[in-house]
Image (cartoon, rainbow, N blue to C red):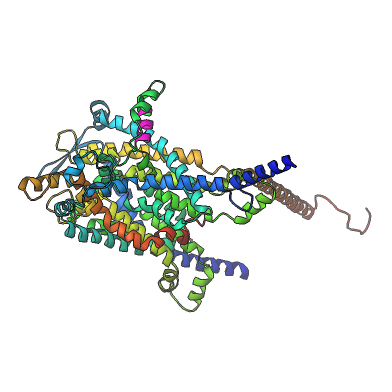
Amino acid sequence: METIKARLTREKIHRFIFGTREKQGFGKQLIVYGLLICIGFVYLYPMLYMISTSFMSRDDLLDTSVKWLPNHLYVQNYIDAARSMNFVPSFLKGILIAALPTLCNVLICMMVGYGFARYDFKGKKIMMGILLFSYILPSQVTMIPTYVLYNNLGILGTILTFVLPALFGNGLNAPIFILIFYQFFRQIPKVLTEAAAIDGAGHFKTFFRIAVPSAIPAIVTVVLFSFVWYWNESYLTELYVQGLSTKSIWTNLVVQLKNFDSSFETRASVGDTATSLNESVRMAATTISILPLLIMYLILQKQFVESIDRAGITGE
Amino acid sequence: MAEKLRRKKKKSLQEREDRMGYLFVLPWIIGVLLFVLIPLGQSFYYMWFNIRITPLETKFIPVGTGNFTQIWLENPEFPQQLVTYIWQTIVEVPIIVVFALLIAMMLNGKIKAKGFFRLIFFLPVIIVSGPVMNMLVSEGASNIPAMNTQVVINAMDTFLPYSVARSIGDLFGNMIMILWYSGVQILIFLSALQKVDPSLYEAAKMDGGSGWECFWKITLPTIKNFILLNAVYTVIFMSGNEQNSLIVMIKNAMFSGTKEKGYGYASAMAWMYAIVVTLIVLLFFLLLGSKKDVYDRIAAKRRRALKKEERNLEKVRRRNARNVRRLEKARKSSRYKTYDGHGDY
């Protein structure tokens, strides 16, 4: 009697911890949640550090007893950083720099993806190969002649340097977007386009009336990612759109952040700022440059998280 | 005859239709010529020259392999960084991919507050950019203070080359940044995992398969292609990110005012860098590329055997026909007389 009872409880404990086939055990769940929370914290750590530091005044920074929570919210850091980064113009131009090429990217990549998916012309395989190759190839190889080309065209230091390649299907990460649309358009049944053709729609009418409206999920994905990637691009923005000349008016927040130290120093030397350059100001600048996308992400989070699902990238 | 004609006409109609495809792809063709292939050739041309830009003209001074010897022999930084980059990529990419898979699998399970966790894990997708990362790294937000990396490096330095030891040490120091690189990869894995047919798991469970076996026998083979996809994506992402000091070096060389540097020098650097990146991608292709599984192999073998049989049959048929023709001809020229049922045999 006693032993049976003991075994029963042991079994119960085992079931409680490891679970049965139908129900997850408590122990397993504990491990999963523990891991998720730990890794989640590690993910958030830099952000938390950044935000908490950005509100610290100089006294808080020097005070070793202040670790996470500043004594009071010191907003002056933000004012100084924003002034040094030229926040409003940089922000607006950043939106333009990201939005215009994105628009071209979406339109052209959609067309090209449709062409690859719907038609079966000669040399298609080679072209797809070149498409992949152009993705793998680092942009540094083509950067120098392209720079010379833009210089000869006289568009260096203008937004056209981003719009032009996007218009010709070679914008930032365009191969990925073309492949997304390719995958998507391959999934729409051919009967649909054939029916449209029988009803007398031409090739382009079929494309605009049938293919484009059905591709809304893919369009959302491409718009979001293209915008974010253009927004975060600093290397090429500095090289082409800013043209590495100080005279150009084009700049975005990320490039401003990159050159933050020097621009802040020059401002500080004129006596334009209330604080000297320190960690808090730099973290405040970082927060500012992240903030617009962060807000966008919080609003559109559902679209972001589900976008790749619905665009069916993975529908091989 | 009529059928043949119809088939030909149908084919040409199809072909004409398909020719419209060129029209759709045309912008991209122009773009790829203008912005990829021609510049590629040009920079290949540039790298054999020392290019000096004066206000009046651009001088091309042929130097042969001078740029390369300059880079390898007189600029110690570039080769050093290149080696570090190679090790770093080879070590970090598998870690990023495995982490992404782990997180994706946990997010794919039955958990509460799934939306909240997803929100956190996709956050890096939005934020990751060169300057932001550099800023965070320089302010020490990227490493966990409790980890002492120098100890790790010293311990490994005894039996590994220094560059390897250092890249592994950097790995521990930069754990957070490495995790931050895996945003898009998690997205891709997650949607791949959701596409796995749940009835497969049910069937496996019926047969008494544990979760561990299910992972190795069902999940992993199904998402194998996406592991490759993610590995390649990670390599490309890391090669183009501004945290990578090599590409900054190339840009600086491009605009350097010194006599030996300039466009030609930078082109030579860029070409070497591109070759290294391509080789790394190739390496992952070879490692993770789709080896056919047993079933596919058997099917292919059977298909080959069938084809061979068919070919043999065809051969026999042709030979028979040839023999018949030959016999017919011989009979016509009446070399052989066959008995046709009349007269004497």
- Give the extent of the magenta segment: B165-173
Q: Position of residue B260 (x, y in %)?
A: 18, 33
Image x and y of residue A304, in percent: 39, 59
B247 with respect to B323 (left or right): left
Q: Quadrant of the N terminus of chain B?
A: bottom right
Across and down, in percent, residue A299 comes to: 34, 63
User: Would residue B290 appear left or right of B73 to someone viewing this image?
Assistant: right
Q: Quadrant of residue B65?
A: top left
Residue A262 visible within the image = yes
| Of the pair B324 and A139, the residue shown nearer to us | A139
Q: Which residue reaches farthest right?
A: B344
Q: Is residue A137 left or right of residue A35?
A: left
- State the residue lying farthest toward the top: B158
Confirm whether the magenta stretch covers residue B172: yes
Q: Is residue B22 visible from the viewing direction of this image?
A: no
Q: Residue at x 26, y 59 (%)?
A: A163
The secondary structure that dominates the magenta segment is helix
User: Does the stretch in magenta take in A154?
Assistant: no
* Quarter-of-image position of residue B74: top left
Instruction: Compare residues B226 and A7 and report the one nearer the observer.
Output: A7
Query: Can you name the residue that lies furthest to the front here?
Result: A2
Residue A29, image x and y in percent? 53, 48
Q: Is residue A143 left or right of residue B59?
A: right
The residue under the point 38% across, 46% down is A41
Task: Count every numbered label the image shows and give the total.
Answer: 0
Q: Which residue is more in the foreground, B302 or A53?
A: A53
Q: Residue furthest bottom?
A: A199
